[in-house]
Amino acid sequence: MPVFMKLRDVDLFLRSARTDARIKRLQPRVGAAAALEAVYAANPDPWAAASSRYRYQSRKYDELGSLLPPGRFRRALDLGCGLGLMSRRLAGCAETVLGIDVAPSAVRRARLLHADQPNIRFETCDLLTLPPSYAGSFDLIVVADVLYYLSPTDNETLKSTAMYLATLLTPGGICMLVNHYFFRFDGDSRRSRRIHDAFAWSPGFTVQAEHRRPFYLVTLLQGTELGVSGPDQRRSDRTPD
């Protein structure tokens, strides 16, 4: 068992699986946004991410923070922020942090949990329909455990999503992409691999590093000028550990 897990963390994965199963049942009928709002409205912490009972999530956020390049960022964007726990971690290395989530109930809860952090702001918005003023204005974007809720998740949708998110970065800005990665050949891991490959092939990014950790995959990407001005035929190569 990974060093940062305890036996009771297995219960966390079971709870998370039940939440994801409910979203999958709801999503075909009401769409991803309404499905996510439904689980947050029914349970203020549907993935038990903020629960002190489990150590996996807090250790994961610390590990993600340690993988970021050294130095201080000017403006960070946490897409699909949920309860804002990663946003809070980013507040220590960024002058300002904006957390975005499509679920109003999650955003309200995040504002309450982090009211003591003056450099964090939370807004309700779909990550694919952000205000035009956001283009080219972030030097750090974190996209953690959210893109597999897109519908559909075909390769073309993933590639266009990657290109769109690249336009939000300043040239040279960093995008951290994080998704579940379990046993490599299971359905969730294959989907995560496709997400990361779509970003790696985007002309708006160059891959800086890839890290495999117990149960999740991290890719660090750097924005290019193409991310701001539009795509051409260049592509980046994935760089594994």
Image (cartoon, rainbow, N blue to C red):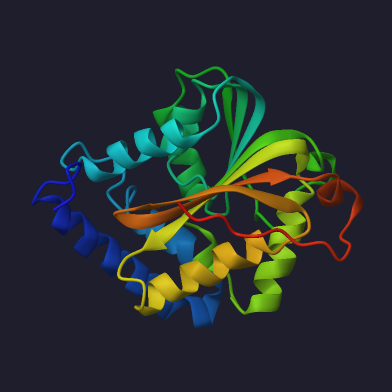
Note whether 83 is above or below 29 in the view shown: above
Query: Looking at this view, is 58 or 125 the one in front?
Result: 58
Viewed as shown, does residue 53 lie left or right of 66?
A: left
Q: Position of residue 2 (x, y in %)?
A: 18, 49
Residue at 21% x, 55% y is: 12
Query: Looking at this view, is 98 or 169 the one in front?
Result: 169
Q: Give the farthest residue toward the bottom.
A: 28
- Which quadrant holds residue 233? bottom right
Q: Position of residue 198 (x, y in %)?
A: 64, 67
Residue at 51% x, 82% y is: 28
Visible residue check, residue 34: no
Note whether 101 is above or below 35 in the view shown: above
Query: Looking at this view, is 66 or 165 the one in front?
Result: 66
Q: Give the farthest residue toward the left.
A: 7
Q: Position of residue 200 (x, y in %)?
A: 64, 60
Q: How many marks?
A: 0
Viewed as shown, does residue 189 lie left or right of 203?
A: left
Viewed as shown, does residue 136 lie left or right of 156?
A: right
Residue at 70% x, 50% y is: 206
Visible residue check, residue 238: yes
Q: Position of residue 24 (x, y in %)?
A: 42, 76
Residue at 50% x, 29% y is: 90
Viewed as shown, does residue 233 lie left or right of 138?
A: right
Query: Looking at this view, is 191 or 211 the one in front?
Result: 211
- Which quadrant holds residue 139? top right
